[in-house]
Image (cartoon, coloured by chain):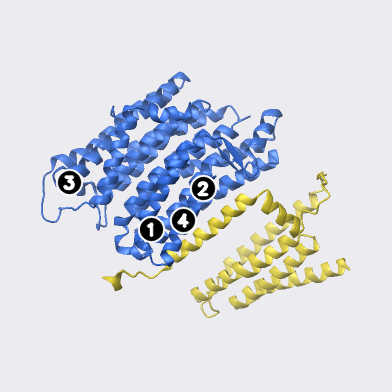
Chain colours: A blue, B yellow
C-alpha cells in the first residue's frame, strides 16, 4: 500500500516539477524515487496485509511482481531521456503517465476486490492507448492507437460483463468472500460464464492466440519505447493478473476448461512462432515472439497451486531480455521510420556492445543455457511434466527450436554482413548502453543463480 | 399527486423523444434530446433515486449532449447536406421497426411470471445521496481514489496529445 501511495506521490511530484520548470530534474528524480520504492518493497516482501476492507492485499506473489514492475519501470524511464529528446517539453507528461501505468499494474496484482482489479486494468489500458497515439503526426501511431483503443475497450467491456455475472452469482465483489461462497454450495451456471468472460478479456490483454490480431500492428505502429513497455511491463502484468484471477476464481468450472486452456496455450505458442518466421520487421518479429512467450507463460495455468515462483522467474527472465532487445532496437532505429532487420546488418562492427546485448537477449528468449530464459522454460516444462501435461511440453520444446531459428537469423545478420558506410554509423547514447548492459548482467545473474528469485516465494 | 407528476413527465419525455426523431435540423434534434433526458432524470427522482437522477443530468444532459453537439457541428451536418434516402430503404426500415415493435410488445404481454426478490432490510435508504456518500468514502474509498487517478491520467493524456510541439521553436 505504501508502495502504491509513494508512486502516486512521485507522479504528482513529476507534474509539479514541470510547473516550476525543472524538467531536467524529472528523470533523475523519478529514477532515484523508484529505486527507493523498489528497496522498500523488496525489504517488505514478506509482509502480508490487507488494506481498506480487503481492497488491496499484499502477499508474497503480489509483492514479488510489484518489485519486478518497479524494476522494469526504472529501465523504461532511464531510456526515456534520449528517446524523447526531440519533444523534451512533454517529458513530464510522459514520465507521469508511465508512473500511473505502474500504479495500474500494481493494482492488478494486489487487488482484493473486483472493483480494484477493473480500475487497475483500466488505468493500465487507458495509459497505453494514450502512449500508443502519442506520436500524433505519424499515421502508423494513429492507426495503432485506434486499433488498440477499439479492441481494448471491447475486451474491457467483456471483463466488466464477466465481473457483473460473477457478482450476480455470488453477490460479492470481494475475492475472499467469493472464494468462501464458491467453495460451499453449487452456483448458478452464470458464475462459470462470468469467469470465462473475465479470462477471455485477460487473454486478449496478453495477446493469446484467438485474440492476438491486434498485437503486431499495434506493436509496429506505436512509438518504440511504448512497444518496449507493452511487450515487457504490460505483458508481464497481464499474465500475472491472469494467473491470480485463475487461482482465485476457478472453482466449480466445467471439466472442459483445462482442456481449453491447454489448447489455447499450444495454439498461442505455435501460431506466434510460425508467423514470426516470416517477419522482416524487427518490431513485428518481437511482437510475434511476445505472443509465443505469452503461451509459454500460460503453461503456469496448468498447475495453479504450485507454479507461482516458476511463473515469476519466467516473467522476470522474459521481461529483462525484452528490455535488452528493445534497447538495441531503440538505438539502431533512432530517427528512421521503419525497423527492418536489414538495419541491424553489420551491427557487430558498428557497435559491438549493442550487438552483444541483442545477441544475449535473443538467445535468452530462445532458451539457450546459462541465460535466464533457458531456466525459465526448464522450470515450467518440468512442472508441466510432473502434472501430466506431456503433449503441452512436447509442443513447448518444438516451439523453442522454431524460435531459435528466427532469433539466430537476426544474430547472423548482425555479425556476417559487414558493410560499414558513413550513413550506417550509429552513436549510442550512454543511457542506452547502461540499460542494455544492466539488462544483460541481470539476465546472466538470475540465469546462474535462479534461487535468488525462486527463493522469494519460500 | 405523484401520479399526475408522472403523467406530465411521461408526456414531456415521449413528446420530446418524438420531436427528436422528427426534427429536420440535427441541432434541434439534439436539443429535444436534452429535454427528454431532463424529464428522464425527473422519473428517476420520482423513483427515489436521487443520485441516479443527478448523475443522469450531469452525464447525459451535460457531457454526452455536449459531445453530440460538438460532433454535429464539427461534421457540419446541416439540412442541405442530408441525402434523401430511396423509397425502398424507407420501406424496409419501417417494416423492420414494426417487426421489432411487435416482438417487444409480445414479450411484454407474455411476461406474466412474477419475481419475488427479497431484499434484506437494513433500515437505511441506500438510494439517498448521504448514505451513498458514506459507503463510497468508507468502504470503497480506495476505488474512489483510484478513479481519481484514472481521471487525472486521462486529462494528462488529452493535454499530451493536443499540446503544441515546441520543437520547431527551439530548433
Q: How many residues crowd around disc 1 within 10 Å: few (fewer than 14), some, or many (20 or more)?
A: many
Q: Do the residues labelled 4 and 3 touch (CB within 8 Å)?
A: no
Reading the image, the residue beneath label 3 is: A351
Q: Where is residue B80 in the image (x, y as percent from the top left)?
A: 52, 80
Q: How many residues crowd around disc 3 within 10 Å: few (fewer than 14), some, or many (20 or more)?
A: some
- As measured in the structure, the alpha-carbon distance from the residue carrying label 1 to the one carrying label 2 is 19 Å
- Residue at image position (67%, 36%) is A177
Question: Do circles 1 and 2 both sit on a common chain?
Answer: yes
Q: Are marks 4 and 2 in contact (CB under 8 Å)?
A: no
Mark before the other along the chain sequence, 1 or 2: 2
On the picture, is A354 further left or further right than A54? left
Helix, strand or loop status at disc 2 = helix
On the picture, is A72 further left or further right than B143? left
- Pick the quarter of the image with the N terminus of chain A: top right
Q: Which of A183 and A106 is in front in this view?
A: A106
Reading the image, the residue beneath label 4 is: A11
- Residue at image position (37%, 25%) is A378
Mark before the other along the chain sequence, 3 or 1: 1
Q: Do the residues labelled 1 and 2 touch (CB within 8 Å)?
A: no
Which disc is residue A26 wearing?
1
On the picture, is A390 further left or further right than A282? right
Q: Which of A403 and A433 is in front in this view?
A: A433
Tell me the subunit letter for badge 1: A
Tell me the subunit letter for badge 3: A
Reading the image, the residue beneath label 2 is: A4
Q: Position of residue A5 (x, y in %)?
A: 52, 50
Which numbered disc, 3 or 1, marks the residue closer to the eye?
1
Q: Do the residues labelled 3 and 1 touch (CB within 8 Å)?
A: no
Mark before the other along the chain sequence, 4 or 2: 2
- As measured in the structure, the alpha-carbon distance from the residue carrying label 2 to the one carrying label 3 is 39 Å
- Placement of A57 over or under B22, stated as above or below: above
Amino acid at each position: 500500500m505504501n508502495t502504491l501511495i509513494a508512486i502516486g506521490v512521485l507522479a504528482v511530484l513529476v507534474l509539479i516539477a514541470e510547473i516550476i520548470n525543472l524538467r531536467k530534474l524529472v528523470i533523475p528524480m523519478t529514477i532515484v524515487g523508484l529505486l527507493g520504492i523498489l528497496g522498500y518493497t523488496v525489504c517488505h516482501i514478506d509482509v502480508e496485509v490487507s488494506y481498506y476492507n480487503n481492497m488491496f492485499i499484499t502477499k508474497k506473489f503480489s509483492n514479488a511482481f510489484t518489485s519486478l514492475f518497479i524494476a522494469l519501470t526504472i529501465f523504461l524511464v532511464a531510456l526515456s531521456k534520449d528517446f524523447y529528446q526531440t519533444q523534451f517539453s512533454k517529458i513530464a507528461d510522459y514520465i507521469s503517465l508511465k508512473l500511473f501505468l505502474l500504479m495500474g499494474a500494481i493494482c492488478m496484482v494486489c487487488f482484493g476486490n473486483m472493483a480494484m482489479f477493473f480500475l487497475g486494468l483500466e488505468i493500465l489500458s487507458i495509459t497505453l492507448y494514450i502512449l500508443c497515439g502519442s506520436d500524433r503526426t505519424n499515421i502508423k501511431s494513429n492507426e495503432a492507437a485506434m486499433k488498440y483503443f477499439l479492441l481494448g475497450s471491447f475486451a474491457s467491456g467483456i471483463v466488466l460483463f464477466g465481473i457483473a455475472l460473477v457478482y450476480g452469482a455470488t453477490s460479492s465483489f470481494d475475492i475472499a468472500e467469493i472464494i468462501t461462497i464458491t467453495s460451499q454450495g453449487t452456483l448458478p451456471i452464470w458464475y462459470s460464464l462470468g469467469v470465462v468472460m473475465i479470462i477471455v478479456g485477460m487473454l486478449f490483454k496478453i495477446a493469446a492466440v484467438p485474440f492476438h490480431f491486434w498485437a503486431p500492428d499495434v506493436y509496429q505502429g506505436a512509438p518504440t519505447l511504448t512497444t518496449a513497455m507493452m511487450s515487457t511491463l504490460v505483458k508481464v502484468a497481464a499474465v500475472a493478473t491472469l494467473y491470480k484471477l485463475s487461482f482465485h476464481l476457478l472453482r466449480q468450472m466445467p471439466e472442459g476448461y483445462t482442456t481449453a486452456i491447454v489448447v489455447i496455450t499450444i495454439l498461442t505458442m505455435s501460431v506466434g512462432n510460425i508467423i514470426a518466421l516470416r517477419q522482416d520487421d524487427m518490431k513485428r518479429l518481437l511482437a510475434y515472439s511476445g505472443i509465443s512467450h505469452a503461451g509459454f507463460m500460460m503453461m503456469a495455468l496448468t498447475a495453479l497451486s504450485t507454479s507461482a515462483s516458476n511463473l515469476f522467474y519466467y516473467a522476470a527472465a522474459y521481461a529483462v531480455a525484452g528490455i535488452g532487445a528493445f534497447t538495441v532496437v531503440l538505438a539502431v532505429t533512432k530517427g528512421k521510420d521503419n525497423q527492418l532487420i536489414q538495419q541491424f546488418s553489420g551491427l557487430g562492427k558498428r557497435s559491438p556492445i549493442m550487438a552483444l546485448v541483442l545477441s544475449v537477449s535473443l538467445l535468452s528468449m530462445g532458451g539457450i543455457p546459462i541465460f535466464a530464459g533457458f531456466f525459465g522454460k526448464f522450470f515450467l516444462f518440468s512442472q508441466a511434466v510432473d502434472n501430466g501435461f506431456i503433449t503441452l511440453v512436447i509442443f513447448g520444446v518444438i516451439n523453442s527450436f522454431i524460435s531459435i531459428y528466427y532469433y539466430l537469423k537476426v544474430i547472423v545478420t548482425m555479425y556476417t554482413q559487414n558493410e560499414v558506410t558513413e550513413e550506417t554509423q550509429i552513436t549510442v547514447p550512454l543511457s542506452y548502453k547502461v540499460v542494455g548492459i544492466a539488462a544483460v548482467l541481470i539476465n546472466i545473474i538470475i540465469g546462474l543463480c535462479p534461487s535468488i528469485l525462486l527463493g522469494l516465494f519460500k | 399527486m405523484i401520479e399526475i407528476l408522472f403523467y406530465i413527465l411521461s408526456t414531456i419525455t415521449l413528446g420530446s423523444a418524438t420531436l427528436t426523431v422528427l426534427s429536420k435540423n440535427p441541432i434541434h434534434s439534439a436539443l429535444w434530446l436534452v429535454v427528454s433526458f431532463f424529464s428522464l432524470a425527473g422519473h428517476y427522482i420520482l423513483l427515489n433515486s436521487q443520485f441516479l437522477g443527478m448523475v443522469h443530468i450531469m452525464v447525459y444532459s451535460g457531457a454526452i449532449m455536449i459531445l453530440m453537439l460538438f460532433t454535429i457541428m464539427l461534421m457540419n451536418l446541416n439540412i442541405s447536406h442530408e441525402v434523401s434516402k430511396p423509397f425502398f430503404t424507407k420501406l424496409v426500415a419501417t417494416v423492420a421497426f414494426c417487426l421489432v415493435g411487435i416482438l417487444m410488445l409480445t414479450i411484454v404481454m407474455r411476461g406474466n411470471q412474477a419475481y419475488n426478490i427479497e431484499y434484506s432490510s437494513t433500515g437505511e435508504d441506500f438510494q439517498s445521496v448521504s448514505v451513498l456518500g458514506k459507503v463510497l468514502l468508507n468502504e470503497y474509498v480506495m476505488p474512489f481514489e483510484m478513479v481519481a487517478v484514472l481521471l487525472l491520467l486521462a486529462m494528462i493524456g488529452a493535454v499530451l496529445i493536443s499540446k503544441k510541439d515546441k520543437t520547431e521553436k527551439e530548433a
